[in-house]
Amino acid sequence: MELHFGGKKLAVGKDRIRTSDGAPAGTIELHGSKGSVYVLDEQDYVLFRAFCERRPKRWSVLDDREELVGTLRMQPGLLRRRVFEYNTYANGVYRIEGIRGERGYRVEGPDTSFFLARRRHWWKMNAYTLDVPETGAVTPHEWAAVAMGIEVLRERSLIWADLISGVLN
């Protein structure tokens, strides 16, 4: 299933999730002040809720029953700030690596391998194209919640990296 989502300028409000033919496939509801994201289906029923935890710094994904289904962490080190790990607990660990020269991330896990494409516009935040099999252990809508977490963790690490480099120079 191919999904297109993201692209809002502000980290608040709703943004439609669409399939490759333009049909609605749900909504992403952004709560910038709380640092959380809700992934909704076509009837605005909550499928996933995700939020950033400060200690330890991770992005937690909960299902519609508010049960933890996975956590996203960035691999430590300033030079490796584009490598993430998504632990689904029940279905294994996925490695998510940013590809230099490409605009997106390669995802490899126990049951799948795919590319999460990212487009950036100067007037918007990242817009994503996600093409994953519908039969995988992690649903496409869960991957949408994970993709939003990649952006949150990456942006927060860039702020700290800039501060550290300013102090060291």
Image: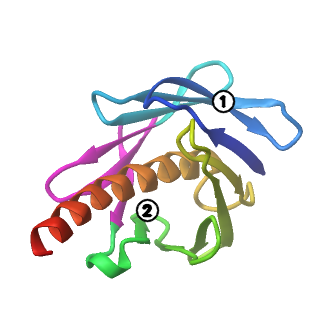
Please state the horizontal and vertical placement of residue 34, each as a whole percent of the image: 28, 30
- Residue 50 figure quarter: top left
In this image, 18 relative to 70: left or right? Answer: right
Q: Nearer the viewer, residue 142 or 90?
A: 142
* Image vertical order of residue 103 relative to residue 33, above or below: below
Q: Please provide the residue range marked out in magenta.
A: 49-73
The residue singled out by tag 1 in the image is 26
Residue at coordinates 29% horizontally, 60% vertically from top-left? Answer: 157
The residue singled out by tag 2 in the image is 88
In this image, 3 relative to 80: left or right? Answer: right
Say what amino acid the circle numbered 1 marks. Answer: Gly
Residue at coordinates 78% horizontally, 51% vertically from top-left? Answer: 1
Within 10 angstroms of label 2, few (less than 14), some, or many (20 or more) residues? some
In this image, 149 relative to 18: left or right? Answer: left
Please state the horizontal and vertical placement of residue 88, each as a whole percent of the image: 43, 62
**Residue 65 appears in the figure:** no
Determine the CA span between mark 2 and mark 1.
22 Å
Say what amino acid the circle numbered 2 marks. Answer: Thr
Q: Nearer the viewer, residue 99 or 62?
A: 99
Residue that sits furthest to the front in the current view: 169
Please state the horizontal and vertical placement of residue 60, each as a whole percent of the image: 33, 50
* Image vertical order of residue 79 relative to residue 45, above or below: below
Provide the secondary structure element on which disc 1 rests.
strand
Residue at coordinates 57% horizontally, 43% vertically from top-left? Answer: 122
**Residue 89 appears in the figure:** yes
Q: Which mark is residue 141?
A: none
* Image vertical order of residue 97 relative to residue 153, above or below: below
Provide the secondary structure element on which disc 2 rests.
loop
